[in-house]
Each structure stands twice: as structure tokens, then as C-alpha cells.
Image (cartoon, grey):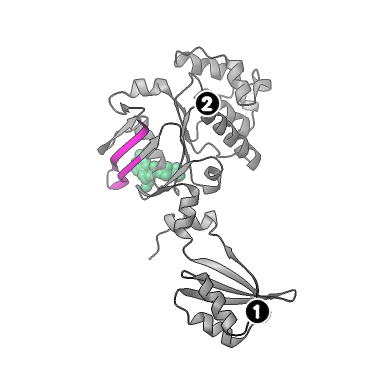
Amino acid sequence: MSAIELDSVEKRFGDVVALNGLSLAVEEGEVFGFLGPNGAGKSTTINIMLDFLRPTAGSASILGYDAQENSKAIRQRIGVLPEGFETYDRLTGRQHLEFAIESKDASDSPEELLERVGILDAADQKTGGYSKGMAQRLLLAMALVGDPDLLVLDEPSTGLDPNGAREMREIIREENARGVTVFFSSHILEQVEAVCDRVGIVRDGEMVAVDSIEGLRDSVSSATVLQVSVDRITDEALSAVRSLSGTGSVDTRERDGERTILVEVEGSKTAVLEALEDAGIVVEDFSTEEASLDDVFRSYTEVTA
Ligand SMILES: Nc1ncnc2c1ncn2[C@@H]1O[C@H](COP(=O)(O)OP(=O)(O)OP(=O)(O)O)[C@@H](O)[C@H]1O
């Protein structure tokens, strides 16, 4: 059974098409990163999963339950960290958790949950004095109430510094090791990279890619930059490389006595090296530059005319 299954979900707000036939399956036990630029449809998707919004067409099933028909049963078994949720300044961390435990009819120990997210020391402090990172941890502890089977985290790293974001990922990993499925939305690829098994990229209300990070990288890195260290650079060698099919731009760099030829290649890298050697150049070393995560994200989320 899939933990989350969305089938051709469409959501319109008047003339605005927020989701345009979005389909997605997240398996049990996965950590799934749901990525997309601002306005792509991430929150709308999550709101439909939680039955805060009704789809115009299509269906959503969560842990085997229909999201519209069985939203109560679903809420008993999932934990949610909503985007932009504020804590109540005048209540302590412990009081927040007591409230969450009571409203879920659960029997967790507030101390244990606070310890799990690393803020037990601040249990009896009012959350008005919490840092943004502490508040996010508290919200995560509230999401963990009732031992959920599925955690839905909407932009959980918002406002966290790199350390806080790393700790959030560690907690996500720990929960996943306990068997929890995690659905994690973000508009920053780096934040999901370290923790997600698979990533889905949404753009304009549609899924444009679903794969592992490596798979996504491979799919956009068909054009890589080959960097060749050479003993010298001649016009003849450069034009030989330019005339090969499957090569894009060819640049040169001279730094600290080192000469490098940079070739954008889609085809054979060996052909480039051979062409250089045929032109009398000694190839001292070569390497390829992998597509950065930014390149990957941009290639899926920017509309190229
Ligand atoms: N209640 C609403 N009424 C009208 N349009 C809406 C409403 N909610 C969302 N939209 C529109 O639907 C589209 C998707 O919005 P959504 O909030 O789901 O995107 P998002 O990916 O979560 O963005 P962000 O990263 O900024 O939170 C946007 O064009 C947005 O303006």
C-alpha cells in the first residue's frame, strides 16, 4: 500500500489552476521530498491531503483512506508540521504538547517528546522566549504526538539557520528509522538532498519529475563540462574540438602556469581527448564537472522559451 496516493488531482481557484492533474505515489517507509518553486502548488497539495481543501477533480488517498471520506481517521494517524504556524507566546512548550496530546487523545509523555527534539531544558519556558529553531522543534514534537505513521512537514526548515536545518534533518532521519513515512516539502533542493530517498518536483501544478537525487542529476547532466589540463593550447586543437559533433562551447583558462581547455560535451568525451592528442597536444589530466543541485532544480523549474 502507498502511504500517499494522488490521482489526477486538479484544484482551481476561480480562473487560477493551482493543481493541474497532479499524480503522485509515496511508498510506506520512504522519506519523500516535495519540491517546487513558490506558487507551484505544494501547499495546495498538502491541504488537499489533509482535507483542508477539496479537489476540483481527482482523488487523494492517505494510508489507504480516502482523504475526503476519512479525514478523521487520517488525522489520527498522521503528524503535521504546517507552514507558517506560530506558537502561542504565553504558553510553555510543555503546555503546547499537553494540548496536542489531549486533542489527539494520545498518551505520550511531553518530556519524552521534548527530549526527542532536543528542547527538554526549555519545557517550562514560555514559547515567546523561544528562538525560531526551538519553536520549529516544538512544532515537530507536536507533530510526533500519537506515534504517527506518516509525517507531513510543510517547509520544516523555514527560518532555521544551517545548524537548525541539519538538526531537523537528523530528527527526520531518526523518525524514519522508527518506521515513519515522511513527506517533506521545500523550495530548496539542498535541504531535501541529505535526507530524502526520492524527490518529486512540482511546477505549475504538475509533477515534472520524480526520482532519486542521483537520478535527477543524471537526467540533466547529459551536457557536462569536460576540463582538460594540457601542455599547450593551439588554435588548431581548439578548432578540431569545435568541429566534433556533440560539443558545445569551448573555452580556455590559464592560471598559475596551468593550461585548461573547457569543453561542453553531450557526446563522447573520449572523442574530445583523441582530437586533442591528434592535434599534437599532451593531455595531462581531465575531469568532468557534475551538474550542481541548483542546475538540476533550475532545469526542471525554469520555463525555457
Ligand atoms: N485560496 C486561494 N485562492 C486563489 N488562489 C490560490 C489560493 N491558494 C493558492 N492559490 C494559487 O495557487 C497556486 C499554488 O499555490 P500554493 O500555495 O499551493 O503554492 P506553493 O508551491 O505552496 O508556494 P509557496 O512555496 O510559496 O508556499 C498559486 O498560483 C497561488 O497563487
Amino acid type, mark 2: Arg
> Mark 2, residues whose alpha carbon is within 10 Å: few (<14), some, or many (≥20)?
few
- Residue depicted at 57% across the width and 36% down the height: 169
Query: Residue 178: which numbered mark, if any?
Result: 2
Identify the element where label 1 is drawn. loop
> Mark 1, residues whose alpha carbon is within 10 Å: few (<14), some, or many (≥20)?
some
| Quadrant containing the C terminus in the rendered view | bottom left
Q: Image height check: is 238 above or below 133?
A: below
Is residue 11 one of those drawn in magenta? yes
Amino acid type, mark 1: Val
Magenta stretch secondary structure, dominant: strand
Alpha carbons under labels 2 and 1: distance apart: 55 Å
Could you tell whether 263 is left or right of 66 in the image?
right
Q: Which residue is mark 1?
A: 282
Judged from this view, the residue extending furthest toward the left is 57
Q: Looking at the picture, how far across and down is residue 116, in whole percent? A: 60, 24
Could you tell whether 197 is left or right of 10 in the image?
right
Q: Looking at the picture, how far across and down is residue 109, in whole percent? A: 57, 14
The range drawn in magenta is 1-24
Could you tell whether 285 is left or right of 191 in the image?
right
| Ligand 1 positioned in quadrant | top left
Quick one: 12 or 57, which is closer to the camera?
Answer: 57
- Residue depicted at 65% across the width and 27% down the height: 129
Q: Looking at the picture, how far across and down is residue 68, in whole percent? A: 29, 28
- Residue depicted at 45% across the width and 13% down the height: 105
- Residue depicted at 48% across the width and 74% down the height: 247
Q: Image height check: is 108 above or below 243?
A: above
Quick one: 182 or 303, which is closer to the camera?
Answer: 182
